[in-house]
Image (tube, rainbow, N blue to C red):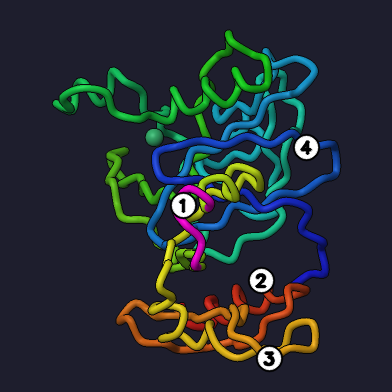
Amino acid sequence: MSAVEVQESIQIPAREGRGVQLKAGQRFRCIDVEGKQCGDLFAFCSDNVREYHSAEHTRVWNDNLFPRVGEQFVTNRRRPILTFLADDTPGRHDMLIAACDPTRFELLGCEGWHASCQENLQKVMAGFGHEDIEIPQPINVFTNLPVGADGSLSWEPALTKAGAVVLGVSKDSIASHCKFRDKFKLNFALLSDPDGKVLEAYGAWGDKVMYGKKMKGIIRSTVLIDKDGKVVKHWPKVSVKGHAEEVIETVKALA
Ligand SMILES: [Zn+2]
């Protein structure tokens, strides 16, 4: 792992979108938290959103249908906007397929509203003050869509392996969790365990010394549970610095 300081971590709930404004030279990383997930990635120039990452121009730039490490992504003005620095997935990403939109789901026979990448993008961009944008063809990260020798496309499952699902547990009420989540803009699930049964079962509730007094309280712990529901690692008395990185490394070793 490179020693890059992570300034912000954004969890994107299923069927939603998130955006971040980056300066030249800043990096971002897309993580498939649960494995076999796909995402649509778009990049716009912040000073002029009429210029944006263009899959069709990028394919010409690289003489390649799909993104590969070391290559650049270019805009509709054929200027580099992103560089693909590293990839620790099996390396399958798509650059051929339009973003899903309400019409697509209607044609698929979906009844009523269904979330779509197009609407997610529009919502995120509106949040940055851009109500009227083009919908570029996305970089479909982790999307596995091989092209047959006859030019046919096959929709295959993503090859990415599991990252992890993050759950926070405390004795606080649901209302207090909601406030905490909103204040710190958390978007992973917080579970309320008012009688402390779950906390006790995982060794996260017990005797501790506070202000010189011995009392019962929360013991900040992390428990890593595998897909079969087995506890594979338990970190009691966690100190925050470097902990998330350590957990991620452990999850990666499991995958
Ligand atoms: Zn989509």
CA distance for labels 4 and 1: 22 Å
Residue that carries the numbered disc 2 in the rendered image: 244
Q: Please identify the residue farthest to the front as the structure is shown.
A: 213
| Secondary-structure class at tag 2 | helix
Label 2 CB-ligand 1 distance < 8 A:
no
CA distance for labels 3 and 1: 50 Å
| Secondary-structure class at tag 3 | strand
Q: The residue under label 2 is which amino acid type? A: Ala
Q: Please identify the residue farthest to the top as the structure is shown.
A: 132
Residues marked 3 and 1 touching at CB (< 8 Å): no
| Secondary-structure class at tag 4 | loop
Q: The residue under label 3 is which amino acid type? A: Lys
Residue 22, numbered circle: 4
CA distance for labels 3 and 2: 29 Å
Q: The residue under label 4 is which amino acid type? A: Leu
Where is 177 relative to 238, above or below?
Answer: above
- Residue 120 in the image, given as x and y percentages of width and height: 47, 28
Residues marked 2 and 1 touching at CB (< 8 Å): no
**Which residue does the image show at 66% across and 71% down from the upper left?**
244
Q: The residue under label 1 is which amino acid type? A: Phe
Residues marked 3 and 2 touching at CB (< 8 Å): no
Q: Nearer the viewer, residue 239 or 218?
A: 218
Which numbered disc, 4 or 3, marks the residue that appears first in the sequence?
A: 4
Residue that carries the numbered disc 3 in the rendered image: 214
Q: Which quadrant would the N terminus be assigned to in this image?
A: bottom right
